[in-house]
Image (spheres, rainbow, N blue to C red):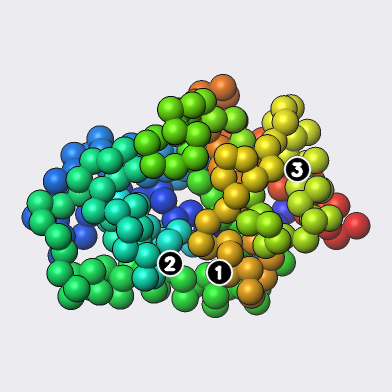
Amino acid sequence: MNLPFLISLPHAGLEVPAVVKDLCRLSEADIIKDGDEGAAEIYAIESSVRAFVSTEVARAIVDQNRASDDFRPDGVIKTETCWQVPVYSRLLTDSEREALLREYYFPYHRRLSELAAEVVLGIDCHTMATIGPPIGPLAGEERPHICVSDGDGTLPAEWMNLLLECLSKSFEEEVRHNFPFKGGYIIREHSKEVPWVQIEMSRVEWVSNQEKRQRLLQGLEWFARKLSA
């Protein structure tokens, strides 16, 4: 079944680009921990959807799910990870930040916009730390297994109710709505073009990553059938 969806996978990359490689202080473990560990396996459903966009660059270096002018410590070009680990040995220059945005950020968002006309729904896909990191919701607390977010309006309410129903049935447990995440920059910005939703799955192994993928795909297939009915 070719699902009429666009999958966005913004935080699965691990690459540190050459322009900042000598300045980056992060270990491989730091980069993995700051990104969406397991996402590349869980959301590997390219052959089942109409469109798929990902990136090789690490979230700790360029965060696609931030506004291009968000230069907070945990913004688009980070100075520290969500675990409060310093990213660089010195502050980046304006030209270094601009080079990262030009090479990795703007092409990602252009591609999402280009593909919007080919789909009925965009899905921004993530994994979340089992226990919330210092920067982010539920810091120091256990997070639910699955959260689906619509940023208070990026998805029609009827669609959201159907999606929650289908995913809850597929995973055989409650899927939380807008908790602990309400949806980031990608779904808010690109919902101007097509409806968008954000999915977060806990990295805790309540089932394997392969089974998470199978159950997700099953839920999305049920959802697509209900939309077309």
Q: Give the secondary structure at mark 2.
A: loop
Residue at 47% x, 76% y: name it. 110
| Three-letter amino acid code of the residue under disc 3 | Leu
Per the image, the residue denoted by label 1 is 189
Callout 1–callout 2 Cβ contact below 8 Å = yes
Q: Quadrant of residue 146?
A: top right
Q: Which residue is mark 3?
A: 164
Label 1 and label 2: CA atoms lie apart by 9 Å
Of the residues shown, which amino acid type is indicated by label 1? Glu
Q: Which amino acid type corresponds to the residue marked 2 in the rendered image? A: Ala
Which residue is drawn at the image coordinates 63% and 56% (left, top)?
Answer: 151
Picture quarter with the C terminus? bottom right
On the image, the x and y values in percent for residue 155 come to: 72, 60
Image position of 123 with respect to 96: above or below? above
Q: Residue furthest top?
A: 206
| Labelled pair 1, 3 in contact (Cβ < 8 Å) | no
Residue 67's disc number: 2
Q: Provide the secondary structure element on which disc 3 rests.
A: helix
Choose the circle earlier in sequence order: 2 or 3.
Answer: 2
Give the image location of residue 145, x and y in percent: 59, 30
